[in-house]
């Protein structure tokens, strides 16, 4: 992960017992306690914390409202406010759901269903790797756990700056994912795909135009990463859209994993057409459960000359 510390992901270091890390250890113990609370209490806490976050995090609130406003112009002002508040509540719920996946996975028993698993099996039939095109869902690692109940998958992740926190998260994720690949380790990602693995990859954030191209997202021009085109070409793998979401009564929720047919046309010779197609796939998925997406990220922050500012 880090050249400065020579830290290897998942490796315990005796220095983690020093006083500078005690706060993190206490925080982890507190989170483990939260994970064993009944869902009714977790839901109330998430609702309460989500409302506080919506009121206090003004910048994030503004970003969320603007994202929803430009992506869902058909919504009224009241609907925008209601859905924006729910985004923050769903994010807090996602934290509890992730804690449950890490520390209390039996909570999900008989709550998970899947659709389209045959599409993954078909894509892997000839031994090719599969790039699972997903999104930054508020379900976080709970979504990965849902998928792991039906098939093996790896994940591309961004390491934490704090080595102790990174170790703890890495070890928790190791119970869910077969492979964890640093987002900077493109060789490792390609190597895993060439071995026929299924890797969850989310090309849905704005990383500027050095790594992408302007393409429509909800009919709004957005900087769209194109790295997955190169990954598919170099690894000779295929792309399969992946989506997961919470459904049903929030007091007794159900979770659904959706795998869509393989996107055989990617990569093509047209970078813009590929980016537009992937954005459209993501857009259609997000319409299923609009508030279960991290809209507080500045999806439209890159605005080249001639493009209207969003934020």
Image (cartoon, grey):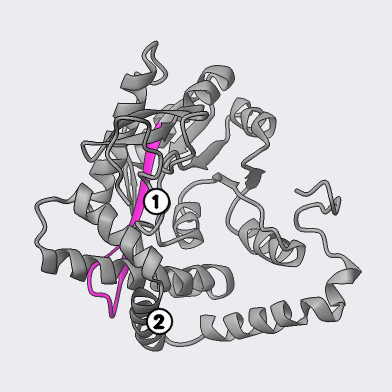
Check if residue 212 falls in the magenta segment.
no
**Residue 122: percent from left, percent from top:** 40, 29
**Residue 164: percent from left, percent from top:** 75, 66
Dot 1: within a 10 Å radius of its alpha carbon, few (fewer than 14), some, or many (20 or more) residues? some
Cα separation, mark 1 vs mark 2, equals 22 Å
**Residue in the picture at 23% in, 42% down:** 284
* Quarter residue 154 falls in: top right
**Residue in the picture at 63% in, 48% down:** 178
Secondary structure mainly formed by the magenta segment? strand
Residue reaching furthest to the right? 14
Kindly indicate whether the residue at mark 2 contacts the one at mark 1 (C-beta within 8 angstroms). Answer: no
Please indicate, yes or no, whether residue 262 appears anywhere in the rendered image.
Answer: no
Q: Is residue 184 left or right of residue 95?
A: right
Q: Is residue 262 left or right of residue 285?
A: right
Check if residue 249 falls in the magenta segment.
yes
* Label at residue 49: 2
Q: Which residues are magenta?
A: 240-256
Q: Nearer the viewer, residue 181 or 294?
A: 294
**Residue in the picture at 31% in, 20% down:** 273
| Residue indicated by mark 1 | 298
Vertical comparison of 50 with 135: above or below: below
Dot placed on the residue nearer the N-terminal end, 1 or 2:
2
* Quarter residue 235 falls in: top right
Q: How many marks?
A: 2
Vertical comparison of 93 with 118: above or below: below
**Residue in the picture at 39% in, 35% down:** 223
* Label at residue 6: none
Select label 1 or label 2 by which is in front: 1
Under circle 2, the secondary element is: helix
């Amino acid at each position: 992960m880090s050249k400065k510390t020579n830290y290897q992901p998942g490796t315990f270091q005796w220095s983690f017992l020093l006083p500078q890390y005690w706060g993190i250890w206490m925080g982890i113990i507190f989170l483990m306690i939260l994970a064993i609370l009944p869902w009714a209490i977790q839901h109330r806490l998430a609702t309460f914390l989500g409302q506080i976050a919506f009121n206090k995090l003004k910048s994030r609130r503004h970003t969320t409202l603007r994202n929803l406003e430009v992506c869902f112009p058909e919504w009224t002002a009241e609907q925008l406010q209601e859905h924006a508040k729910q985004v923050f509540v769903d994010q807090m719920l996602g934290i509890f759901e992730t804690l449950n996946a890490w520390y209390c996975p039996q909570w999900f028993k008989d709550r998970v269903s899947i659709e389209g698993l045959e599409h993954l099996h078909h894509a892997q039939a000839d031994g090719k790797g599969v790039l699972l095109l997903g999104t930054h869902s508020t379900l976080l690692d709970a979504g990965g756990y849902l998928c792991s109940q039906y098939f093996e998958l790896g994940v591309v992740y961004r390491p934490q700056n704090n080595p102790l926190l990174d170790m703890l998260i890495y070890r928790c994720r190791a119970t869910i994912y077969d492979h964890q690949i640093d987002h900077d380790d493109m060789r490792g990602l390609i190597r895993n795909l060439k071995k026929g693995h299924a890797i969850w990859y989310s090309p849905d954030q704005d990383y500027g135009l050095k790594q992408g191209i302007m393409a429509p997202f909800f009919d709004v021009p957005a900087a769209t990463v194109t790295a997955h085109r190169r990954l598919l070409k170099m690894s000779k793998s295929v792309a399969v859209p992946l989506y997961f979401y919470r459904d049903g009564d929030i007091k007794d929720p159900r979770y659904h994993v959706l795998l869509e047919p393989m996107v055989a046309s990617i990569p093509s010779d047209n970078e813009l057409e590929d980016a537009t197609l992937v954005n459209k796939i993501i857009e259609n998925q997000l319409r299923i459960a609009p508030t279960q997406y991290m809209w507080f990220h500045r999806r439209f922050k890159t605005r080249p000359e001639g493009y209207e500012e969003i934020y």
